[in-house]
Image (cartoon, helix red, strand yellow):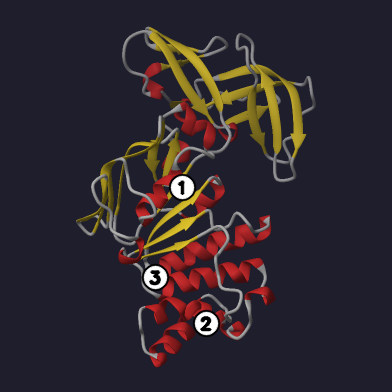
Amino acid sequence: MSKLVLRNVSRTFGGFTAVDDFNLSLQEGELVSLLGPSGCGKTTTLRMIAGFMSPTAGTIELDGEVISSAASSLPPEKRKMSMIFQSYAIWPNMTVAENVGFGLKVRKAGPDEIRRRVDEILEVVQLGALRERYPAELSGGQQQRVALARSIVVKPAVLLLDEPLSNLDANLREEMRFEIRRLHDEFRITMVYVTHDQAEAMVTSDRIAVMNKGRIEQVDAPYELYSRPKTRFVAGFIGRTNFLEGRRIGPDVDFGGFSVPAAAMQADGSDGAVHVSIRPQSIVLHRNRPAADGSPCCVPATVQRRAYLGEYWDYHVSLPGISQTLRVTARPQDVFEVDDPVFVRIDPDQLTLIS
């Protein structure tokens, strides 16, 4: 049985639909991110899971029991969930230990149990030496660890995180992504994580639900989502990509400047338009035409512009017969000048059909 299930959940505000026929199931101990641009409905969905608002339609179930519907909704304090907000919401007048133990005190745990469990979790989040400090004496990353410890120590059925790293600088965000994943792996708490940061979602998640205009575009593991996006929105939102439009003519798909066997890219069906995505790092540049290596597609091109970004070169190249330029990621040692003639090798296996 699934731990948390959202069935046909919708939420409207007047004539505006914020969440539209949302369906998602989480297994026990799974971390699923809701990823999408501002206004796509991800925080509204999280607030409905938490019980801060009710769905206009559909149901939310926890351990097989309905906790939210249009007719009734279980109050937040009775859902056995914890939530971490963007602002951390830790008490400034309490020490680290008092903040972490606050939820246990509300649940009327005994003093000895509170101290034992607080000490245990503070060691796990590496704050044992700071237990008597106040929030104003902590860094942003340390405050975030306090918020995590306070949420985990009560052993919630589900932990909800609403863009918890948005207030941290870039280096701290990167560190805390791995920290959240480490804590999840240690405690195996079911988590729903809201973010608009793709790297954050890719690092922390077992699966990612990409949202757009209140609906789920695709739910998948990070690798599958990146390598095999199903829609143009997902392909463009997760990382960088090139979009190409071809036309199925007999056994081949013609892209104007080159053609690819339809069978090689699994483009079935009748003749007609074919839309594909290909990642910049899946295209290889050569100074000279490479010797026959089994690749069915190697065409001449010209470097239009470039940018050196330290870890890689970002090239834009033009191909005869194709109106837009292709973006190509190359190794630092693969140096080409603007206007250089090059050869572009495209592997059909890297062309992903999208709708």
Residue 230 position, x and y percent, is 40, 30
Task: Check disc 1 and give the amino acid type.
Answer: Thr
Q: Nearer the viewer, mark 3 or mark 1?
A: 1
In primary-sequence order, the first of circles 2 and 3 is: 2
Q: Badges 1 and 2: C-beta atoms under 8 Å apart? A: no
Examine the image and state in which quarter residue 106 appears: bottom left
Residue denoted by label 3:
187
- Left or right: 301 in relation to 298: right
| Circle 1: element type | helix
Report the Cα–Cα distance between label 1 and label 2.
Answer: 29 Å
Task: Check disc 3 and give the amino acid type.
Answer: Phe
Residue denoted by label 1:
43
- Regarding residue 207, the answer to whether it shows in the image is no
Residue 185 position, x and y percent, is 42, 66
Residue 324 position, x and y percent, is 63, 16
Report the Cα–Cα distance between label 3 and label 1.
Answer: 24 Å
Report the Cα–Cα distance between label 2 and label 3.
Answer: 22 Å
Residue denoted by label 2:
98
- Residue at the spot 65% in from the left edge and 19% down from the top edge: 325
Q: Is residue 28 above or below residue 92?
A: above
- Left or right: 112 in relation to 36: left
| Circle 2: element type | helix
Q: From the viewer's side, name the closer residue of 203 and 151.
A: 151
Q: What quarter of the picture does the C terminus occupy? A: top left
- Residue at the spot 65% in from the left edge and 28% down from the top edge: 285
